[in-house]
Amino acid sequence: MVKQWYETLFENYARTYDKESFTQGTIQEVDFLEQEIGFDKNKKILDIGCGTGRHAVELAKRGYNVLGVDLSESQLKRAREKANEVGVSIKFEQGDARNLNFINEFDFVIMLCEGGFPLMETDEMNYAILQSATKALKQKSKFIFTTLNGLFPLTHSTQEFMNSEIVEGKSSEHSFDIMTMRDISTFEVADDDGKIRTLHCNERYYLPSEITWQLKSLGFSQIDIYGCETGKFSRNIKLTPNNFEMLVIAEKKDI
């Protein structure tokens, strides 16, 4: 089976990933997550697409019960190393976010920094990730994730888009399909050994209204969407077309 671009990217990218500019806001982001969970350390947390465990490890350091899941064994290896380095016990599992085996187990699910969603090749695959996260949640619970903001490419030129500091790697080809809301690009990125890899990327941008109706179809009763900035998670940032990402907070409440 041919590997997808995101599988190749994360094969040997863990230490490089931790140095990227978009991973430097962990402390504030976890501060925000603590507020959203009400500082309740009895709550069980699932981190989907946990990567090198930067949020999971920080939450565990603060006394929370966290389970991290990721598709990349290389990323998980680094996550386990980081947990050992700071002396916290976290269970990390390799798994496909579209087919998790958790049913009504968690009070709080996070999926940050495009942890799987919306990297999939089809809309159905992306939706399956939302379904999987929803099934993992208890009835009275909360789901927080970040995703690409479709308003951004609709209101910025391709050149502006590629010049933005948020796009990692060096792109040689780039196009945005307004009919599918997919950004298709070819870019180069260095792995942990300094080897340059050329990847053909295909990512789905979502409009706020799309995210809202998908989550409503899954049974979430309260859905709030905000602008998202690295290390500045907040309910006070209004979503605008200038936000590259959006922060989604969805709640399932008692029936």
Image: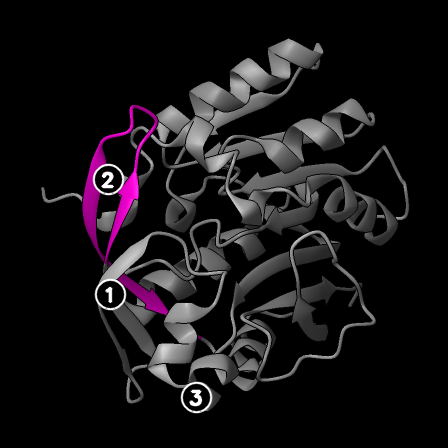
Q: Residue at x 78, y 64 (%)?
A: 253
Q: Is residue 149 left or right of residue 171?
A: right
**Residue 192 magenta-drawn?**
yes
Residue 185 numbered tag? 1
Local SS, label 3: helix
> Which quadrant: the C terminus?
bottom right
Observer-nearest of 49 and 201 = 201
Dot 2 corresponds to which residue?
8
Local SS, label 2: helix
**Can residue 65 be seen from the camera position used here?**
no
The answer to whether residue 50 is above or below residue 169 is above
**Residue 97 magenta-drawn?**
no
> Colour scheme of this structure image?
one colour
Observer-nearest of 14 and 59 = 14
Q: Is residue 182 left or right of residue 164?
A: left
The answer to whether residue 230 is above or below residue 185 is above
Q: Residue at x 66, y 62 (%)?
A: 229
Judged by its main secondary structure, the magenta piece is strand
Please report contact status of discs 1 and 2: CB closer than 8 Å, yes or no. Answer: no
User: Residue 8: x, y in percent?
Assistant: 24, 39
* Amino acid type, callout 1: Ser
The part of the chain drawn in magenta is 187-205
